[in-house]
Image (cartoon, coloured by chain):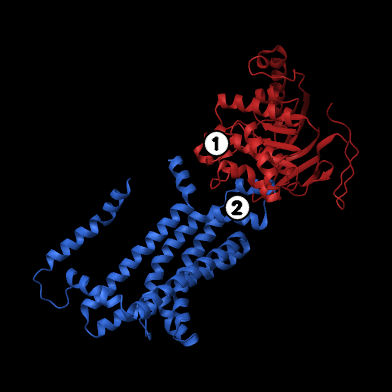
Amino acid sequence: MSNTTTKTNRGPKTGVIEVPEDVALSVQHLKKVYQTDGGEIEAVRDLHFDIRAGEFVCLVGPSGAGKTTLLKCIAGLLAPTSGLVALDGRLVTGPPKGLAVVFQEYGRSLFPWMNIRDNVELPLKNQGVAKDERDRLVDDALEAVGLAHVPKSYPWQLSGGMQQRVAIARAIAYQPKVLLMDEPFAAVDAQTRADLEDLVRRVWKRLGITVLFVTHDIDESVYLGERVVVLSSSPTVVQEDLTIDLPADRDQLETRSMARFTELRGHVYEQIQRAKAEAPNRTSSTPTV
Amino acid sequence: MSLAKRLAYFVGLPILLLVLWWALTIGNTNFFVPKPLQLFEIFGDVWFGDRLVTDVLPSIGRLLAGVAISIVLGIVLGIVIGSVRLLRQLTEPSLEFLRAIPPPVLIPVLALIIGINDQMKVAVIIFGCIWPVLLNTIEGVRAVDPVLNDTCSVYGISGGARMRYLVLRSASPQIMTGIRQSLSIGLILMVISEMFGSSSGLGYAIVQFQRTFSVPEMWTGIILLGLLGVALSLVFQFTEKRVLRWYHGLREVDR
């Protein structure tokens, strides 16, 4: 189901990239080299994968695998050294419309001078969405993340988990085609994390959006994803592209106690161990990016 | 804290000091030592007659004009310089040089260039008041959180909207710090700018009283300056509390 062979055709003039019709996000031979005082650091060597519209894909890899670099390239925040990213068949050269990001640092991605409602509303207001429409979208989004009762609070008055809910609400109110999540639950406690995982699955199903979820947590990637892309150590390539054939309805207790879950989890774990072990062979220095 | 309690804290020490001052100067016949009751009696006559229109209000007007222009100019220039790294590096030495010049030494020069008028006095105030606002704004703009910056980029918030929703708000704690410093510098420069070759204003009036040995009148002028400082500080605190409510809340939580 993955690794669809695509005829790539760079068209920088028009920005139109040929990809199969059902592909929402296409990462093609992406390479990112950082220029530093200590020389060049190759964070991402050659990443190549497609995500079909409506898919929930988890990206997992050892720490320092260039996950954040990749995500920033996809979000148009960083320009790749070579290769390309295409969203809905259009070359990404800057932050594209139709893409929302939920960052790991929830405390630093919400505006502390705005209340919850204003935070969620701002991107829509900035886009010139009419007031009625805006109100409806914001209400729906807050409802969806279970925060309809605190619109007037400020982010810093809420717990970490609730702040991340606000960031998710802001992302879904924006009505993105693709939702990127950069280790969004790495900094919240385990119980909140389980709640938020189920919340993201629910939102994904309800809205039918495409989700790319970056994590370093193997369990989380298997529990959440329909597909798990395992990255190698830096300089990064795709180590494995794995379909998660678990039932669509996931449950924290039931799903996690399935034999298949344990199997898949073990498989991903092995892959990551292998990635770590192979790392020194690929490069003499192992920079952390 | 209740309003009554806050008011009691606010005026408690001043009243105590006044009583002490009164007690220590009873029976003192030295002409140069001010007595509180005597000053209280003449205060109204000295300042709320013709002088209100000829001296007090023009002084306050020039002060407010100078401070207001400094704030607007300081914030606008600060945002521009703070946003562009090249501009920051180019201007930094010059700004440090200019801010090190004490504005009073410029009064004769400005008097020659602009003339002895309101504009000159306002210019002196601006030359002293703009630096804290400008330099603090530059710092504040530079320190905008990279994650918030990325967030704005992702959601297409750029240009004027980014300035308004992100940069200005994010830098507002530093900007307010700058404004607070500017206010006290402004009051000092208001007085000094009126001491040379001037014919009106609080500073001028106080110098006149000194030269004519109207010692109690001179003291009332000094007290008026102090009261003006308190009033400015109250207005500032009132504004700051509203503008930076989020910031104080955030700091409270972080602690």
Tell whether A159 sits left or right of B105: right
Residue occupying image coordinates x 17% and y 65%: B21
Q: Which chain is red?
A: A
* Whether residue A262 is situated above or below residue A227 in the rendered picture: above
Left or right side of A15 for A159: left
- The tint chain B carries is blue
Q: Chain of mark 2?
A: B
Name the element at disc 1.
Answer: loop
Q: What's under tag 2, amino acid-wise?
A: Tyr
| Residue B248 image point, x, y percent | 45, 47
Q: Mark 1 to mark 2: distance in Å?
A: 21 Å
Task: Identify the residue shown where x is 66% and y is 16%.
Answer: A256
Quadrant into which the C terminus of chain B falls: top left
Q: Nearer the viewer, mark 1 or mark 2?
A: 1
SS at mark 2 in the image: helix
Q: In the image shown, does A253 or A46 lie closer to the viewer?
A: A253
Q: Which chain is disc 1 placed on?
A: A
Q: How many marks?
A: 2
Q: Which mark is residue A150?
A: 1
Query: Does the image show residue B235?
Result: yes
Q: Disc 2 designates what residue? A: B165
